[in-house]
Image (cartoon, helix red, strand yellow):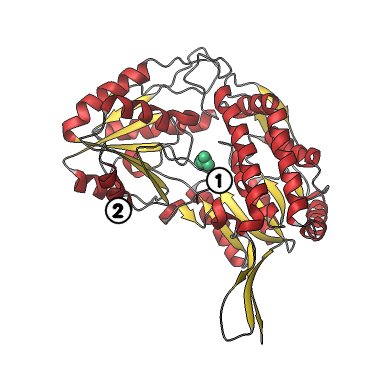
């Protein structure tokens, strides 16, 4: 496993992958720790989760630099990610007991109730794009419910994975309540199969989701999958073009476009399409490519060179299929080592083109022109994905009506799709199943037990 700085191409550190004996030993420890951890009451768990939030804030600069060095995002975005982790920990520290309170249900018993109890050890298989937050989004609720965690992180962020383990230890969690496994993708099958693992949560591609779901299914283990997306960003003809284009820029280029919930297909009503594209391309052209640690930089590298090359290939296939290049479309970095890609706008994208049919995980906006709102909804739903979507209009009642017609796990009206610990997060169709965050998220990894008393 190698930690490589995507802004320079330099190897920061290399790590050896664990052998089976080491994996076994850690899984046993985490399994035993779960018995100890589940005996902690909510107040005790909450106290440690608050400590963790505090550690994120105290060590924010260190962690943010680590993220930027390992996967390339802008340092200011990395700082925001760490703050989001602190907020997520606090949310579950404060709400878990309420979310998992016993529910008394009237039935033919003298007393019947539902109690929520931990499942055991949850394996978190996590991606590199938000290397701290994706893990905390899954682990904070699961741990507050009394589960322990083993993390298999993406192989390009090993230092983030180890820093997370250290943060839990610093916060005072039992020694093996949270452990990072230094394992390869090939070793994951055996980990899922191990009897110490009760359930699995994966954030990653639909391809990875299929594999993990198949293995978990074979071993009858519960899994939650948060997979890819191709979120529509629908602009109606009454939207404010200037402010909506500014939001579009953030929605597409956040995290250098490497987010499952980034806006990917910009569906524009014909009458405003020219003005919108012009505005968006002006905004794109102002961004400076450079060192992700510099305040003035707007375009950071993508996380890995192979991912950048794959994106470029999707752009080239879309152009060959008839899309029109408005700006970008080039691999930048001649003479630079980093895996940069110029912010790109493709116009006249239609179904059948890579930019419409596939997830574009990078700084490329696909413009889809439509004649009316019916056409907009039809095309928004013409995808195998169903993660998020947004509608932009001055008429919020109309926006809500359209939000209900979009097939996705969350739809925002006049707002960028984002996760929020108070609201459920997840997708339908090939974007996965199950929900994270809110009370829905914490109830994914519990035994929802009925107790019936005559
Ligand atoms: O790739 C998915 C990114 C989700 C980020 C979030 O939870 O805000």
Q: Which residue is mark 1?
A: 421
Residue depicted at 57% across the width and 26% down the height:
72
Q: From the viewer's side, name the closer residue of 90 and 130.
A: 90
The reply, left or right, for residue 334 in relation to residue 215 is: left
Name the residue rendered at 74%, 37% in the picture: 162
Rendered position, 277 above or below 265? above
Residue 380 in the image, given as x and y percentages of width and height: 30, 46
Q: To which quarter of the image does residue 196 belong?
A: bottom right
Q: Are marks 2 and 1 in contact (CB under 8 Å)?
A: no
Residue 388 image point, x, y percent? 41, 46
Q: Quadrant of the C terminus?
A: bottom right
What is the number of the mark on residue 405?
2
Specify whether 73 is left or right of 2.
left
Asked if ligand 1 lies within 8 A of label 2, the reply is no
Image quarter for residue 244?
Answer: top left
How far across and down, in percent of the image, does residue 412 sit? 38, 43
Q: Is residue 181 visible?
A: no
Q: Specify whether residue 369 is in view.
A: yes
């Amino acid at each position: 496993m190698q930690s490589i700085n995507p802004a320079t191409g330099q190897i920061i550190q290399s790590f050896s992958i664990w052998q089976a004996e080491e994996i076994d030993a850690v899984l046993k420890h985490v399994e035993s720790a779960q018995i100890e951890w589940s005996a902690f009451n909510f107040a005790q768990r909450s106290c440690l989760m608050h400590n963790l939030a505090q550690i994120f804030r105290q060590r924010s600069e260190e962690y943010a630099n680590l993220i930027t060095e390992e996967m390339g995002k802008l340092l200011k975005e990395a700082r925001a990610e760490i703050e989001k982790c602190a907020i997520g920990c606090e949310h579950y520290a404060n709400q878990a007991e309420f979310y998992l309170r016993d529910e008394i249900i009237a039935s033919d018993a003298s007393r019947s109730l539902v109690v929520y109890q931990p499942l055991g050890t949850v394996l978190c298989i996590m991606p590199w794009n938000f290397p701290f937050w994706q893990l905390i989004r899954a682990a904070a609720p699961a741990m507050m419910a009394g589960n322990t965690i083993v993390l298999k992180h993406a192989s390009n962020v090993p230092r983030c994975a180890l820093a997370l383990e250290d943060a839990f230890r610093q916060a005072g969690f039992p020694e093996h309540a949270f452990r990072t496994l230094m394992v390869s993708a090939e070793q994951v099958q055996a980990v899922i199969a191990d009897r110490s693992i009760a359930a699995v949560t994966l954030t990653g591609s639909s391809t990875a989701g299929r594999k993990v779901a198949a293995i978990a299914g074979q071993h009858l283990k519960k899994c939650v999958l948060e997979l890819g997306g191709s979120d529509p960003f629908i602009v109606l003809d009454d939207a404010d073009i200037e402010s909506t284009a500014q939001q579009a820029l953030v929605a597409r280029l956040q995290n250098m476009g490497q987010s499952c919930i980034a806006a990917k297909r910009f569906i524009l009503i014909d009458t405003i399409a020219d003005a919108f594209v012009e505005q968006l391309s002006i905004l794109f052209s102002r961004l400076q490519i450079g060192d992700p640690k510099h305040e003035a930089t707007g375009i950071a590298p993508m996380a890995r060179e192979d991912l950048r090359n794959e994106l470029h290939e999707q752009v080239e296939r879309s152009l060959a299929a008839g899309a029109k290049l408005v700006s970008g479309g080039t691999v930048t970095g001649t003479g630079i080592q980093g895996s940069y890609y110029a912010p790109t706008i493709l116009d006249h994208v239609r179904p059948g083109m890579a930019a419409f049919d596939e997830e574009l995980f990078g700084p490329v906006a696909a413009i889809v022109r439509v004649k009316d709102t019916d056409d907009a909804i039809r095309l928004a739903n013409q995808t195998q994905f169903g993660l998020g979507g947004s509608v932009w209009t001055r008429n919020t009642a109309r926006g809500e009506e359209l939000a209900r017609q979009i097939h996705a796990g969350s739809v925002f009206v006049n707002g960028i799709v984002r996760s929020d610990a108070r609201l459920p997060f997840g997708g339908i169709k090939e974007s996965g199943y199950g929900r994270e965050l809110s009370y829905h998220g914490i109830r994914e990894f519990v035994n929802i037990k009925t107790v019936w008393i005559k």
